[in-house]
Amino acid sequence: MVVGLSAAERRYLTDGIAQGLRNDGRGLYDFRAFSVELAIIPQANGSARVRLGATDVITSVKAELGRPQASRPSQGRVEINIECSSTAAPQFEGRGGEDLSLELSRALYRSLLCNNGTGPAIDLSALTVIEGKLCWNLFIDGLVLSSDGNLLDVLAIAVKAALSNTGIPKVEVTSAAAAEQEADFEISDNPDDFSGFDVSHVPVIITLTKVGRTYIVDATEEEESQMSSAISIAVNSAGHVCGITKRGGAGLDPSVLLDMISVAKEVSKSLLSTVDAEIMAAESRGDDQM
Amino acid sequence: MALEFISPEGLRLDGRRPAEIRQLRANLGVIDKADGSATFEMGNTKVIAAVYGPHEVQNRSQQLLDQALVKCEYSMANFSTGDRRRKQKGDRRSVEISLVIRQSMEAAIMTHLLPRTQIDIFVHVLQADGGTRSACINAASLALADAGIPMRDIVASCASGYLNNTPLLDLNYLEDSGGGPDVTIALLPKLDKITLLQMDAKLPLEMFEKVFELGNKGCVAIANYMRNVLLENTKDLAFARGVVKV
Amino acid sequence: MLQSKAFMKKTRRGQVVKVVREHYLRDDISCGAIFCQSCEKESACLSSSAPNILIVDTNVTLHHIDLLENNAIDDVVILSVVLEEVKNRNLSVYNRIRALCSNPMRRFFVFANEHHKDTFVKTMPGESPNDRNDRAIRSASLWYQKHLGQGPPILLLTNDIENKRKALQEGICTETVQSYVESLGRPELFDLVAQVCDSSLAEMDIEDSRPSKKKLIYPEHRPMSEITSGLQQRIFHQGKLRVNRYNPIEAYVNSESIDEEIIIYGRINMNRAFEGDVVAVELLPEDQWKEGNTLKLIEDEEDEVEEKVGLAPDSVDAAPTSLQAKPGDFGSKIGSRTCGRVVGIIKRNWHSYCGSLEPMPMPAGVGGAVNALFVASDRRIPKIRIQTRQLGNLLDKRILVAVDSWDISLRYPLGHYVKTIGDIGDRATESEVLMIENDINNRPFSEQVLACLPPLPWSVSQDDLKCNYREDIRHIRVFSVDPPGMYQIREANQMIEEFMLAANISVAEKILKHYPLCALLRRHPIPTPKMLEPLIRTAAAVGVKLDITSSKSLADSLDNALGNNDPYFNKLIRILATRCMTQAVYFSSGELTPPEYYHYGLAAALYTHFTSPIRRYADVIVHRLLAAALGLFKLPAVFHDKVQLNSLADNLNFRHRNAQMASRASVELHTLIYFRNRPTDAEARIVKIRSNGFIVFVPKFGIEGPVYLTPKAKDNNGEESCKNSADWIVDEEQQRISTRDGKRVYMVLDVVHVHIEVIEPQPNRSKLVLTLLK
């Protein structure tokens, strides 16, 4: 993303960070305030919109029935696909957003499911309907509508929120007797008959962006334009690091890395509790509307 | 048995009468970084539009010396339809709709006032339930106004169709898939000029007249709604800047 | 006001999708009362003088539609939630209730409760759709009660105990149908009340309701979920049940999931399925397939196997297909064929049936309700038990009866009286019966239809003369060649037929050229060699070789099949030929490929019906197409609508077939009347050899029927013995049957002498019987 900053502006920004003071008045490890809305895409099984500063993303979860992979007969599959809408920036027009979209999709996938797709964040065995025959596959779609930095962290929050909003329809298996038989099922008559999703293990992502010699969390687009490198660390509620992605061109000193991880773990504690609180608030707002 | 789209009591499947539009909702300034933006909802159809510009022409070879270059891109979110599908950008349908939106907007924008500039219009369908073209045009129109681009008139669009021997206004997806004709109109209401007219399926001429007339009325109603939204938005802005006091 | 409806739907491809629809609530929905001060009155019909304004629930509408149709019931509110449920459960009842609502003579009002802001109810967590809909009905009733406070009291009719209890609790006046009808004090209405074995209504239990005595006669139907999965696994097979017209305890099911036709033998195996029901069938173990023959008479001795005497089919259109003819074969071997039993009924085909009550003595006492057995004139329909308070009036009448339910503990289904048609045996009544049986509407045209005609007296106006698409041909002499007694102009006749065919063909060409996708044409499928097999075999047996390579060659070889000085020989061969073919049908050209347009019987590449618009609706359609093709009129919208056009063609075929059946039935009726007091001997020709006799055709009267060589003797156990195999030898190839000693030999097309007389084996059901004269 091209942010046109003058030399003086650049200097002001980097010097400020070096002294622990950011342009918008935040400290180095402060997150901007964010809001969560749930169930904003009614056709999806679960969805959420998260706005953090001027960054605005929508994520949806759609569950589809399918056959489990032969290698993992008792697990469903999760796909994550992020798209950067050209409404967020003219650069995303045409194929302009593809590289970033792919980078974000892969980083999220790694954090939630590991490279082999069996990460602990989502209980994939809960998606099984009939072992070896029928399972739910989750398709997580994210759309970046507006961007002011820190997309990955916001998307991770939105995925967690959308999963917490996801209801998997209850199906009754009507025939599965013989091994050769095609599995058949009926949907429950009752539209309220859903099984919910446990999201307590879904991590948040803390991206630490290095500007000069200092690193900051939740960088704005302006700040990101001055970064040398960044590292995204996924941490879950147990304080476990679930995934790390290094981004940006410049190299990183290994000793700083460990330091960054411990900062991320620290920041994640308050972020996780804020995320949970926001999701809960959004849920209760949703109930009021009913 | 064919689906009964209108009951003998005169109600459509969703409870509307034949000449009624779905519930409209619009919001301006929804994307901070954009010069102008808007969401527009017609029932369960929801689109977001962003306008960037007027700015320098990116590709100099496309620069026009006497007027602004208007570009438009239409895309659909993966989750916008009931059956989830990877929506590829730049398929033929999207390219066609992009073109249609650009042409209807060009008719309204006073491009001659902004030579050597480029105006980008991006529309993204968040939920599709019939009438996406119209919703896109309405959203784009509001986003342009929000961006302060000089326009001759607002562009308002609405679709109409013909099912069970009755002209119907603003078809939803279910009605759209009923196999009847679908007429999409975009109108410059003050100038009373049509900037877009599309129809699929065949329809005898005298019925077309009725359907067209109904669609036209729909456009006028939508234009009135959009004008109110813009007016309210201007009042809010004026209030926020302390120009007026309540 | 906007509500969103979301529900999960299983798609055909086995996927689950979430469907979200908008649902608008309104404040401009009229209550339909003429006396209402606040609502719009354009379509209002509920009157202030009514004793009650009735609201009926779904089951009452479904089961008591006959009662609702009676003029005594009026000022009824039909809620849209009820309509929707009725539509999903029984389309024919839905059409009837819709007809009531649109009938200006009746006061039935449709209230769109689902879209009214004050009567819409949202499903509560854990609430079943049924409970939610019942609540919606109560909510609407309550609203009416408040809204029309000053008018006649609102009365909710429901037979559901739970719904009734809740309604009373909420302060809604409610009654069961039975108690309401009783309160009207009109005993004749009581017969119309449906007899439903409703477990929730203990007092409704009729017949032998003493629980200890309740004996199960039929197996339970399997639950729907089991049936669905059984069908999936091909343990069960789905198909339409067709009952053998000549042997009602034998039925057939053709299922896509199995190549062979499944035979259902006996009432227990048919398990309460009716003719035309869509059923799920389970195959019997193969060792039971052979027992089919012995099963039949143990179970139901009053039904006997017989073949009915009827008219010979005389045209291509009247010829039954080989498939339809097969069930009629008497003495067919069941042992070798696939047998099955009905395990569930997927879709009922219940409607009203014509017939009469089984004679019974008048019970002592007056005015009480009596159980009577109804015997339908269609032999495929089982007897139906009805309750009546007017037995004396009904015993000698043809009546219409509707089926309501069939419990596993009851030998016969329960039904209720709908209406009286007339006296049994009366020509007009019996004609009316066959009209009803074939679903032919012979009511006078409605006011709306007559309003389309120009006022009388009519004369040619100046406008008519100026009209550019009409021509005045009054100066040309036109004459008719139909008048009786004009046999000498037979050739002219024939010429007219040729002109007619030529006109039809050229119109077919013209409309197809202009409208290749929506021309209404008529085709006659080419018979397959298999279908012609019986014909070739019979012909070969009498030494005639038929060439079936084309319709032309077949026609030529039929022309040459003259026999030796036998005037009827050729006619008989032709009759046999026609019955091997399928019917000609109407279709829309867009549905088929040009080679399939072929009309085999007329050897024409294209054909349609154009020449008789005053007596055939198909011709009217074709006239409209032609007028549009000539640019005189616009093409009507129906031709743009593929679905509508196809259903039109289907309906034309359906009506055409029904009209033919009715016409045959009418001739049969008159044949019966003719022979009633006139037993006759006549010459007959054998047309088909069977294992225990043969089928003959009586040229003089045009009737056809079976002649049994072995008398149907009953042995000591009351069982029929079929000794035919011992006494008679059948040679299928040669189409001959002979005694063991070879003294008596009958061959196909042989001349025999038969005695024709009318007997009445069962009361009120006479039939024609042919017996062989020595």
Image: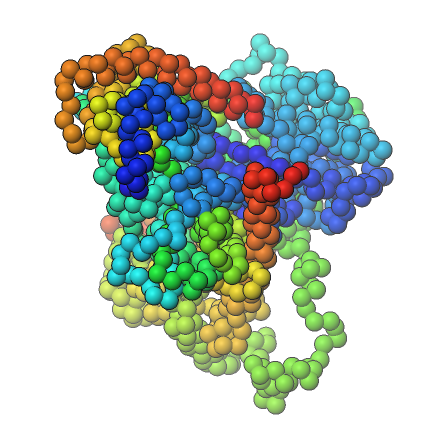
Position of residue C512 in the picture relative to residue A124 (left or right): right
**Quarter where residue A250 is shown:** top left
A179 relative position to B16: left or right: left
Q: Nearer the viewer, residue B238 or B132?
A: B238
In the orientation shown, which residue stands out farthest toward the bottom?
Answer: C475
- In front: C404, or A285? A285
- Looking at the image, residue C287 lies above or below residue B32: above
Query: What is the x, y in percent for residue A210?
Result: 24, 25
Query: Can residue A192 be seen by looking at this rendering?
Result: yes
Above/below status of C441 relative to C121: below
Q: Position of residue A283 (x, y in %)?
A: 48, 21
Q: Is C634 on the left or on the right of A91, as rendered? A: right
Specify the farthest residue to the front. Answer: A8
At 19% from the left and 14% from the top, the residue drawn is: A258
Residue pictured at 31% horizontal, 40% vertical: A5
- Image quadrant where one finds the N terminus of chain C: top right
C413 versus C75 height, above or below: above
Front in this rendered view, residue C599 or A239: A239
Residue C177 can be seen, yes or no: no
* Number of disc labels: 0
- Residue beneath the point at 38% across and 23% down: A26
From the top left corner, tell me how far across and down residue A243 is, in percent. 22, 20
Residue C559: % across, % down: 32, 70
Picture layout, residue A183 above or below residue C535: above
Residue A270 figure quarter: top left
Instruction: Looking at the picture, tell me which residue is in the foreground, C368 or C70.
Output: C70
Which residue is at 49% across, 77% downward? C631
What colouring style does the render use? rainbow
